[in-house]
Image: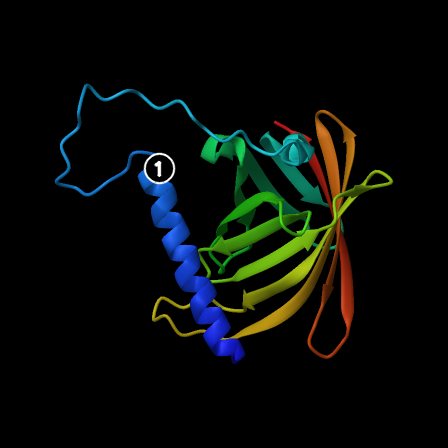
Amino acid sequence: MRDGNIWTRRTTLGVAGAITGLLALGIGPANAQPSGPAKPRKQELPPPPQVRGLDFTLGTFDCTQPGQTKLEVTMAAKRGLGGHYYYSDVTQYMAAPYPNVYGKGVYGWNPVDGTFIMQYHDNWGSSGTASSPGWQDGHLRFAGNLLQVLNPNPTGTAKGVTLGIKDDYQVIDRNRFTIAQTVTSPDGTSKNGNLDCRRR
């Protein structure tokens, strides 16, 4: 049997298994009449314990990067989907004439690969993904790619570049953490930056 047929059969069996599972839970056709009063369901899957490794981000933090140009960023994170994911609203204050960047980072735990995962998108149209093997020697290191829009345009057409991103998180105390970032351009050149984030 060719691989394509094996995949098709496995997919079919998977769908059949899912349907059987739904029937076992009492979820039937829409026209089925219940035999008695509906019972409330309280069977919620608890979040994986590993995701608590992101608790240091919860709350609102003001982040700065002193230097030739001062970078100012605000991050406000909270739990979502019953604690399975952490949602972080990010604001980067830009100098005129550029509009501020409003983005969202979604952090969670990948139980299949045993890694932290991150997805990012913002109002400029930039987007990216990254992953981390977890805390190692006091560091939480994410690595991934970011499609960075260089100049946002309301027409929906803009120039951009794909960057390699490495973020190294370190917790100083419950009210402060730092991020050391390395950004790599397609030509292989890299730039380093640091954010110092303090709880508001």
- x, y (%) of residue 5? 46, 76
**Is residue 103 positioned above or below 10 on the image?**
above
Q: Which residue is mark 1?
A: 24
Residue 145, image quadrant: bottom right
Q: Position of residue 112 (x, y in %)?
A: 63, 50
Work out whether 116 lies above or below 81.
below
- For disc 1, the neighbor class at 10 Å (few under 14, some 14 to 19, many from 20) is few
Three-letter residue code for mark 1:
Ala
Could you say which is closer to the camera, residue 89 or residue 151?
89
Q: Position of residue 173 (x, y in %)?
A: 77, 26
Image quadrant holding the C terminus, namely top right
Please indicate whether residue 92 sits to the left or right of residue 144 in the image.
left
Which of the two residues, 184 or 7, is positioned nearer the viewer here?
Answer: 7
Residue 21 occupies which quadrant of the picture? Answer: top left
Query: Residue drawn 60% across and 30% down?
Result: 58
Look at the numbered disc 1 and give the secondary structure of its residue. helix
Nearer to us in this view, 50 or 105: 50
Q: Nearer the viewer, residue 86 or 69?
A: 86
Q: Give the total of numbered labels.
A: 1
- Judge from the rendering whether residue 126 lies leftward or rightward of residue 192; answer left or right: left
177 horizontally vs 81: left or right: right
The residue drawn where x is 76% and y is 64% is 191
**Could you tell me residue 83's position as x and y percent?**
53, 31
Residue at horizontal 49 percent and vertical 52 percent from the top:
100
> Looking at the image, which residue is at 54% across and 69% down?
150
Q: How is the image coloured?
A: rainbow
